[in-house]
Image (cartoon, rainbow, N blue to C red):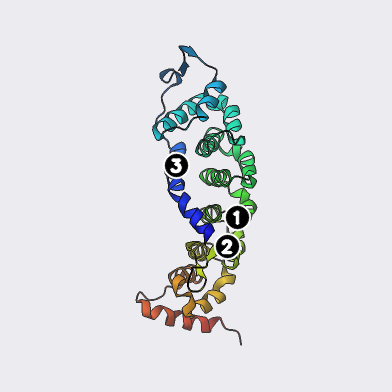
């Protein structure tokens, strides 16, 4: 429960980061020429590295971050050494290290994959998250094994992002690892009163199982569909069963459970 409170306290920051610092880096909006964005200090043009490292050290406003991204993109490959230094050093604010990670991905494209994927093991959860987001934006499906490991990350938010990578990239080879999330105690919480509760991550994992067409989950899901203790995730179960079996349950909610019970009979072996 304490872990969930910590996560909740950081969600506003995370949402801001995802909305402002991630997608905009990979947008195709027009960028001004370097000559239109002179970077000067005390009337003198500074070296690229000195300027970028100086700017990345600051606690920037959203507008300033936007300008800094344009500057770095204008410098293209010449900005990479500076961006890598920012990524590697805790001397820079987390949000700026996040931006640097996405900029490396934007500038280098898929060639950045081997380097950025190394940050999936970084001690800072922000860098692990930034790595996952960048690799997803680059559609890097060759790191399926690393995404599967990230499903067991100590950070709830990182686990959620790893699941999104697997789902969005349709990594069917990771289906069994996704199913394993249902047995990870960290994906549940214990309220002050009552029994253990499932987080939304369990619901998302069940839906992902359907998107990945994991046939081995059919019988367990059919069984879960008949039990009241899974009613909080019934919609996700219904979704997945429809995806995997190709059968669509009735629109009326009361008829769905009965429908899947009949389907379950056909899956029983004599």
Mark in the foreground, 3 or 2? 2
Q: Position of residue 58 (x, y in %)?
A: 49, 30
Mark in the foreground, 3 or 1? 1
How far, Cα to Cα, is label 2 from label 1?
Answer: 8 Å
- Quarter of the image for residue 87 reads top right
Q: Nearer the viewer, residue 112 or 151?
A: 151
Element at label 3: helix
Looking at the image, can residue 29 be seen? no
Tell me the residue that label 1 is attached to: 154
Nearest to N terminus: mark 3 or mark 1: 3
How far, Cα to Cα, is label 3 from label 2?
Answer: 29 Å
Q: Nearer the viewer, residue 25 or 122?
A: 122
Element at label 2: helix
Q: Position of residue 42 (x, y in %)?
A: 46, 13
- Quarter of the image for residue 13 reads top left
Nearest to N terminus: mark 2 or mark 1: 1
Tell me the residue that label 2 is attached to: 186
**Residue 23 badge:** 3
Q: Quadrant of the C terminus?
A: bottom right
The structure residue drawn at horizontal position 47% and vertical position 33%, both measured from the top left corner, is 59
The structure residue drawn at horizontal position 43% and vertical position 83%, both measured from the top left corner, is 258
Circle 2 Cα neighbour tier, 10 Å, few/some/many (<14 / 14–19 / ≥20): some
Q: Nearer the viewer, residue 270 or 70?
A: 70
Q: Position of residue 14 (x, y in %)?
A: 46, 47
Looking at the image, can residue 241 be seen? yes
- Quarter of the image for residue 123 reads top right
Circle 3 Cα neighbour tier, 10 Å, few/some/many (<14 / 14–19 / ≥20): some
Identity of the residue furthest to the front in this view: 192
Q: Is residue 142 above or below residue 89?
A: below
How far, Cα to Cα, is label 3 from label 1?
Answer: 25 Å
Please say if the residues under marks 2 and 1 sit with CB atoms less than 8 Å apart: yes
């Amino acid at each position: 429960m304490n872990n969930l409170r910590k996560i909740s306290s950081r969600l506003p920051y995370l949402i801001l980061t995802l909305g402002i610092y991630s997608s905009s880096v990979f947008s195709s909006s027009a960028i001004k020429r370097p000559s239109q964005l002179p970077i000067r200090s005390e009337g003198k043009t500074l070296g690229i590295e000195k300027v970028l490292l100086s700017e990345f050290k600051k606690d920037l406003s959203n507008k300033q971050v936007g300008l800094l991204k344009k500057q770095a993109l204008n410098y293209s490959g010449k900005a990479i050494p500076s961006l890598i230094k920012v990524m590697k050093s805790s001397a820079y604010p987390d949000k700026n290290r996040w931006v640097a990670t996405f900029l490396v991905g934007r500038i280098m494209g898929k060639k950045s994959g081997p380097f950025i994927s190394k940050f999936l093991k970084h001690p800072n959860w922000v860098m692990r998250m930034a790595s996952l987001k960048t690799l997803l934006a680059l559609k890097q499906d060759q790191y399926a094994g690393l995404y599967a490991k990230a499903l067991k990350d100590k950070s709830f938010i990182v686990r959620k992002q790893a699941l999104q990578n697997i789902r969005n990239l349709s990594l069917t080879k990771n289906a069994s690892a996704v199913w394993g999330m249902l047995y990870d105690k960290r994906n549940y919480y214990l309220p002050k009163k009552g029994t253990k509760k499932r987080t939304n991550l369990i619901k998302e994992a069940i839906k992902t199982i359907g998107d990945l067409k994991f046939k081995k989950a059919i019988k367990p899901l059919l069984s879960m569909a008949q039990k009241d203790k899974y009613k909080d995730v019934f919609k996700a179960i219904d979704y997945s069963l429809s995806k995997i079996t190709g059968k669509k349950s009735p629109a009326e909610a009361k008829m769905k459970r009965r429908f899947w019970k009949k389907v379950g009979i056909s899956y029983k072996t004599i």
